[in-house]
Amino acid sequence: MSYILDALKKAEREREMAQFINYNNKRTQNKWLLVFPKIRSMPWMSIILAMNVLLLILLFWPKAPLVAPQVYIVPQNVGWVSE
């Protein structure tokens, strides 16, 4: 029982000490870095995304014009015999 009470007291002391520790550093003081942590990679990601869109457009662009083929209906010559 005393081991449990000692462990609880030790945990309470450590919790009180942890409240006084400042975990902030220079990087987290700038709020823009907290909101947008990867702001530096945004231009590169935008360029890569644009290149992928252009590549997909080039791959799926039709090679020939999309025109329906012309169909000619030729009547049969009934009674015409070639010799």
Image (cartoon, rainbow, N blue to C red):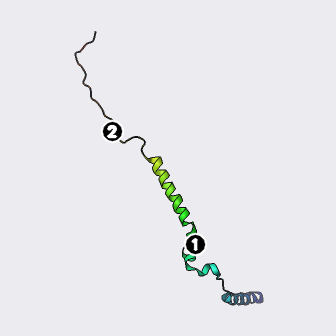
Residue located at (66% from left, 83% from top): 23
Q: Secondary structure at mark 2?
A: loop
Residue 37 image label: 1
Q: Amino acid at mark 2?
A: Ala
Q: Earlier in the sequence, mark 2 or mark 1?
A: 1
Q: Which residue is at a point 24% across and 24% down the rendered structure image?
A: 75
Q: Which residue is mark 2?
A: 68
Around disc 1, counting alpha carbons within 10 Å, would you say few (fewer than 14), some (14 to 19), or many (20 or more)?
Answer: few
* Of residues 80 and 13, the one drawn nearer to the viewer in this rendering: 80
Question: Is 42 placed above or below 75 here?
Answer: below
Relative vertical location of residue 65 with respect to residue 13 in this rendering, above or below: above
Q: Secondary structure at mark 1?
A: loop
**1 left or right of 57 in image:** right
Total number of numbered discs in the rendering:
2
Q: Indicate the position of residue 20 as horizontal and vertical percent values.
A: 67, 89
- Quarter holding the N terminus is bottom right
Q: Residue at x 66, y 86 (%)?
A: 22
Label 2: few (<14), some (14–19) or many (≥20) C-alpha neighbours in 10 Å: few
Residue 31 higher or lower than 9, as above or below: above
Question: For the C terminus, which image quadrant?
Answer: top left
Q: Quadrant of residue 11?
A: bottom right
Query: Which numbered tag is attached to residue 28?
Result: none
> In this image, 19 relative to 2: left or right?
left
- Looking at numbered disc 1 in the image, what kind of residue is underneath it? Pro
Residue extending furthest toward the right: 3
Mark 1 and mark 2 in contact (Cβ < 8 Å)?
no
Residue 29 image point, x, y percent: 60, 82
**Percent coordinates x, y for residue 2 in the rendering:** 77, 90
